[in-house]
């Protein structure tokens, strides 16, 4: 049993949004869900939720219309890769900046 | 009636690990450590020790298995020597940073190239900055007692402990020692509990990428960044000296042995010439000290350093304040600089008013014989009143026993 005088600081954490810091700043592409194809959104009942299950940062909600917390989504694209109906597209973040032009 | 038995140093280590009820042993054989692992494997196979022996393909894996076991809240042990220790070096740093209370015996041996199976301390010295506590035994009884105390220290302060003892000089020689009573060991060393033990009921991520800055975790608790964790390791490493002393006092009440956990002085009280050494060589020096006092009227003493990391700098500096000469004999060095222990002692003395004349001797590398006569002669010659060297000469290590 550790000595109470010692803090024994370790890098131990439970997983969740923000556990690795503000990972949203790492992103270059963000996932955008097409609700007309998304299984739970289309069926109106809880099903699939693979994006929620597989997100390494726990930033996808388990709602009928899943929401992605962009403060922490690091844009890894696992959700888009794993979506069985290709409902998730990875869109360059720059496209969402108002007034920005892409060549 | 003494319950002493006569056995090798390696068997003494294995008996201590058995008494400590280590639950996972993962080790790869390397001379001169091999008999420790053989003995432990034999004890487990014979049903005399309730532990899992994990045969691994390398020392790196041995330490990795110990890291896994300790992370799951299991008491883990390994042992190695020389290049084996270096092969697990990356995992040594990991075990320390993860604050895992692993105990490892290092049976000190010279490092290749060229191959040497014989004793020196370069293996341990090369790993002094890994974040492990490093202690050095001088005889078989200390191997047993230090190994048991090492488990308790590691588990109280959550820093891994390396118990060093000299290859062949201690590992393969036979000496009487008293194995402690098993029931008393159980009272001295309670079962291991780790606050971050991995469990499916409480899933946690351990030692994932840790950012430079502190952050709020998912519960909103402020958690340190990498530098904060490393600072805590450094601070608590220093605090471990006091805990080691407390453990030694408790060990004395249980077993009647101890009293010199950090430094072990021999005839140092009135000494003008103090020799500092680690491991079995410190005991060899007791004969030298007796002779210098008896034949030459030189008030000599030897201070055995039992704990090298954390370095008890202030304690050593105070102990050396009244000495005129301090002679640091060591079996390892920082190549291109000087003896590592010598450099540490010089640094420890700097803030204190009295700075004795310091001498550095490199001896016994790769098992080169260390005749007691030559230790006597070099010590006697170096403290002669007419032998005053300029700083540029006195501050470099003298190699004793060269043949070429």
Image (cartoon, rainbow, N blue to C red):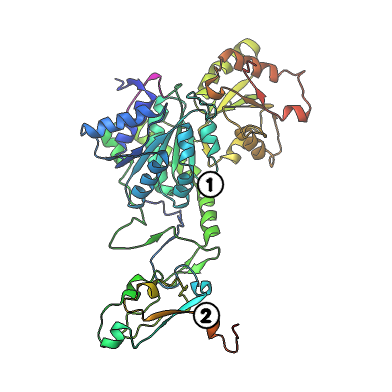
Secondary structure, mark 2, is helix
Q: Residue at x 51, y 46 (%)?
A: B131
* Residue A77 location (% of width, % of height): 43, 72
Distance of mark 1 from mark 2, alpha carbons?
48 Å
Which residue is at the far top?
Answer: B295
Q: Is residue B298 visible?
A: no
Given the image, what chain letter belongs to the residue carrying mark 2? A
The verdict on residue B179 being magenta is: yes
Q: Could you say where residue B217 lies in the image, as x and y percent from the top left? A: 44, 69
Frontmost residue, B237 versus A87: A87
Asked whether B160 or A88 is in front, the reply is A88
The residue identified by callout 1 is B238
Q: Is residue B174 shown to the viewer in this render? A: yes
Label 1 Cα crowd, 10 Å radius (few <14 / some 14-19 / many 20+): some
In this picture, which residue range is highlighted in magenta?
A: B171-180
Question: Pointer 1 indicates a residue of which chain?
Answer: B
Q: How many marks?
A: 2
B322 magenta-colored: no
Residue where numbered disc 2 is placed: A93
* SS assignment at label 1: helix
> Horizontal and vertical percent for residue B201?
28, 63
Q: Are marks 1 and 2 in contact (CB under 8 Å)?
A: no
Q: Quadrant of the N terminus of chain B?
A: top left
Asked if residue B60 lies left or right of residue B272, the reply is: left
Crowdedness near tag 2: few (<14), some (14–19) or many (≥20) residues, C-alpha within 10 Å: few
Q: Say which residue appears at 69% left-offset and 16% top-offset.
A: B381
Residue B80 image offset from top left, x and y in percent: 42, 34
State the residue at coordinates (52%, 63%).
B211
């Amino acid at each position: 049993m550790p000595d109470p005088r010692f803090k024994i600081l370790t890098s131990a954490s439970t997983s969740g949004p923000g556990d690795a810091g503000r990972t949203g700043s790492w992103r270059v592409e963000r996932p955008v869900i097409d609700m007309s194809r998304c299984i739970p959104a289309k069926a109106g009942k809880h099903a699939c939720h693979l994006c929620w299950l597989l997100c390494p940062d726990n930033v996808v909600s388990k709602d009928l219309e899943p929401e992605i917390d962009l403060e922490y989504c690091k844009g890894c694209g696992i959700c888009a890769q794993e979506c069985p109906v290709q409902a998730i597209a990875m869109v360059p973040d720059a496209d969402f900046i108002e007034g920005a032009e892409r060549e | 009636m003494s319950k002493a038995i006569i056995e090798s140093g390696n068997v003494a280590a294995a008996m201590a690990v058995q008494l400590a009820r280590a639950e996972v042993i993962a080790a790869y054989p390397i001379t001169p450590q091999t008999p420790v692992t053989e003995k432990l494997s034999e004890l487990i196979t014979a049903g005399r020790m309730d532990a899992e022996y994990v045969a691994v393909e390398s020392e790196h894996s041995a330490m990795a298995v110990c890291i896994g076991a300790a992370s799951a809240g299991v008491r883990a042990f390994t042992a190695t020597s020389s290049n084996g220790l270096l092969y697990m070096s990356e995992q040594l740093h990991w075990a320390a940073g993860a604050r895992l209370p692993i105990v490892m015996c290092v049976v000190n041996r010279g490092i290749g190239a060229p191959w040497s199976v014989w004793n020196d301390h370069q293996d341990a010295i090369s790993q002094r900055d890994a974040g492990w506590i490093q202690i050095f035994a001088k005889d078989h009884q200390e191997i047993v007692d230090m190994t048991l105390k090492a488990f308790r220290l590691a588990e109280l302060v959550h820093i891994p402990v390396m118990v060093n003892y000299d290859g062949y000089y201690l590992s393969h020689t036979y000496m009487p020692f008293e194995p402690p009573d098993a029931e008393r060991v159980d009272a001295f060393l309670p079962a291991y509990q780790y606050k971050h033990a991995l469990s499916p009921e409480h899933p946690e991520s351990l030692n994932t990428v840790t950012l430079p800055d502190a952050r709020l975790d998912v519960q909103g608790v402020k958690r340190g960044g990498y530098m904060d964790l490393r600072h805590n390791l450094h601070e608590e490493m220093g605090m471990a000296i006091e805990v080691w002393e407390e453990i030694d006092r408790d060990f004395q009440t249980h077993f009647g042995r101890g009293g010199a956990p950090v430094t072990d002085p021999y005839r140092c009280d009135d000494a003008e010439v103090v020799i500092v050494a680690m491991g079995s060589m410190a005991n060899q020096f007791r004969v030298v000290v007796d002779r210098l006092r008896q034949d030459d009227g030189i008030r000599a003493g030897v201070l055995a350093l039992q704990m090298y990391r954390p370095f008890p700098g202030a304690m050593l500096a105070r102990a050396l304040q009244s000495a005129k000469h301090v002679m640091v004999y060591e079996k390892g060095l920082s190549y291109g600089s000087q003896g590592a222990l010598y450099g540490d002692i010089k640094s420890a003395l700097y803030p204190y008013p009295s700075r004795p004349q310091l001498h550095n001797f490199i001896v016994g590398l790769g098992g080169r014989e260390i005749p007691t006569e030559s230790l006597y002669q070099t010590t006697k010659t170096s403290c002669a009143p007419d032998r005053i060297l300029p700083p540029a000469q006195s501050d470099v290590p003298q190699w004793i026993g060269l043949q070429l």
